[in-house]
Image: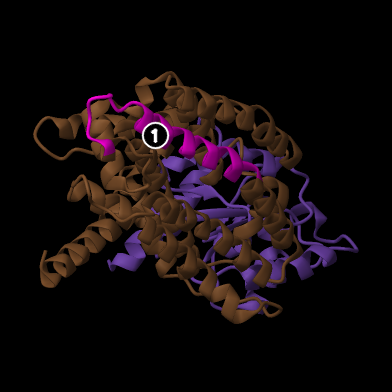
Amino acid sequence: MGEDKLLIRAVIAFAVAFFGTAFVGLMSTWVDRKVTARVQARVGPPWYQPFADFLKLMGKETLIPEGSRRTGFVIAPLVGLAGIVLASCLIWYNDLYPNPRGGFVGDLIVVIYLLVVPSIALMMGASASGNPLAALGASREMKLILAYELPFLIAMVAAIVAAAAGVSATAPAEDARITFRFGSLLHQQHVYGVVAWKLSGIIAFIVALLCIHAKLAFVPFDIPEAETEIASGVILEYSGPLLAVIKLTRAMMLFTLPALLVVVFMGGFVFEGISILWAILKYVGILVAIILIKNTNPRLRIDQALKFFWGPMTILAIVALVLAVVGW
Amino acid sequence: MSLATWAFKKSPWVYHVGTAACNNCDIEILDCLTPRFDIERFGMVLVGSPRHADVLLVSGVCNKRGAERLRDVYRQTAKPCAVLCIGACAITGEMFRDSYYFDGPPDRIIKEVDPNAIIAYVPGCPPKPEAIISGAIKALSVL
């Protein structure tokens, strides 16, 4: 493929990823607030609410606390935004231009790596802000990251092993290799069966769903950002445009993380003909599951969350990995 | 009406500042957040930090200790912001006006910090949640 064509495709993918993820992410936060309101027998905000919130925050002044490290404080939200936009770019590119040899060799690893960046950036910003409550929030965020990353990674490995193990015996040898490339992963799932239908896939999917729930910092795992306990912990000192960037990052994560789950477990988004409806249904299904878990649980303490992820979740993920290796 | 003003009217985030109140007004403010009155349909969300807030709900008589805190909280709120004084105590100090520890109704304290502050008053002891919502809407429509 000519270099110019590749460059144009990359630019298109980046533009779609940025604006598409921002738009779909913000609408997903509205869906979340509306469903939450309905579940609580309320009316809830109108459809343009997330956009009004974003515009309002852009119009407020930026207050930088006197005792903070100004550079780290200001850069942190931007670093987080950059990480999530790049991660969503990889997911969009491989769904917009499907190709069995598409993507590059370490796709999934890079996406998992980039998805940790917003959480770490938030920690950096909270530590830079010089507020003791924010420092408490930062330490809780760190413990939460340690907690959920382990079962998340094991569940992802279980998924790709299950995808490779499901390849039939008569297929060419290179299809049956365990692969981190998104293009090959999607090809394996389209041709030889979606990961989520296998037993190991179901277990790994449940583990991954709870892990991204924690990554999104939704109740029961919104420990770092507890409003009433530590006055919004990590984002306490942010105001104005920086807070808008943080909220936008959270909204983009609300799109990117379920989309990653759809790509790894359910064969990705297929944008042709009637499959578009099925693609939207897959995404909305995961979103509704997240919203319902959010509305029916109280907040956990950080030690309870740690025990939960390093106990039952890790054991389930290892069980899923063993089942995937065996072939189930 | 510019886009900024429209966005400000449609998404006012609320922070509750209690300065030595008897808590009746605080209970009525909390009532506004419950499903019966549901201020989230106006875009109002209760936030945990004054830095995130657009509207400060001030309740209570401001005593000397509360006055220092109220000045700090007002300075920490990102401008533009509006202040809503809720209840008769927050407007005039009502029956506690002659007490030894009284330090001026909250609007006097805020005007010390910022003479051009946007302040609205919701009378009542305590005002009903409908009155609080109506006061907030009227304050926003003046902007």
Reply yes or no: does residue A23 show up in magenta: no
Q: Nearer the viewer, residue A177 or A100?
A: A177
Which chain contains the residue that carries disc 1? Answer: A
Residue stretch in magenta: A147-173
Q: Provide the major secondary structure of the magenta segment.
A: helix
The residue under the point 8% across, 34% down is A273
Q: Horizontal and vertical percent for residue A305? A: 68, 37
Which quadrant is home to the C terminus of chain A? top left
Residue A325 seen by the camera: yes
The colour one sees for chain B in the rendered image is purple
Q: In which quarter of the image is residue B20?
A: bottom right
- Relative side of A21 to A6, left or right: right
Q: Name the residue under label 1.
A: A287
Q: Nearer the viewer, residue A105 or A13?
A: A105
| Residue B53 point in image, percent of width and height | 55, 60
- Residue A228 in percent (x, y) is at 68, 46
